[in-house]
Image: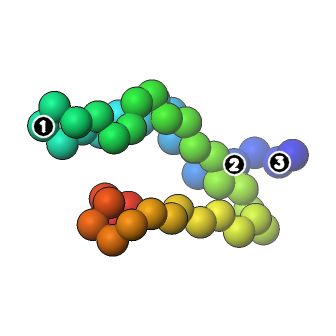
Amino acid sequence: MSAPILSLRGINKSFGPVHVLRNVDFDAHAGKVTALVGDNGAGKS
């Protein structure tokens, strides 16, 4: 597979005491469709 056009490593996010992401890694590759899905208000943006 080719090198990713976007690479994120060790992403963490919390809202106060609630951890919603812990040490998440993400790669996006050219020519591939990638979707981030979740409920409205879940913090996708």
Estimate the x, y position of residue 21 in percent, counting from the top left.
Answer: 38, 38
Residue placed furthest toward the left: 16
Q: How many marks?
A: 3
Q: CA distance from mark 1 to mark 3?
A: 38 Å
Q: Which residue is mark 3?
A: 2
Compared with residue 34, is residue 27 higher up or lower down, i.e. above or below? above
Do the CB atoms of the residues marked 1 and 3 lie less than 8 Å apart? no
Instruction: Give the class, few, some or many, for how many residues have Cα within 10 Å of label 1's Cα (few <14, many ≥20).
Output: few
First of labels 1, 2 by sequence position: 2
Q: CA distance from mark 3 to mark 2?
A: 6 Å
Do the CB atoms of the residues marked 3 and 2 lie less than 8 Å apart? yes
Amino acid type of the residue that numbered disc 2 sits on in the rendered structure? Pro
- Residue ID at (45%, 63%): 38
Q: Which residue is mark 2?
A: 4
Relative horizontal placement of residue 14, taking residue 40 as reference (left or right): left
Amino acid type of the residue that numbered disc 3 sits on in the rendered structure? Ser
Which image quadrant is residue 12 in? top left
Estimate the x, y position of residue 18 in percent, counting from the top left.
Answer: 22, 36
Do the CB atoms of the residues marked 1 and 2 lie less than 8 Å apart? no
Q: Which residue is mark 1?
A: 16
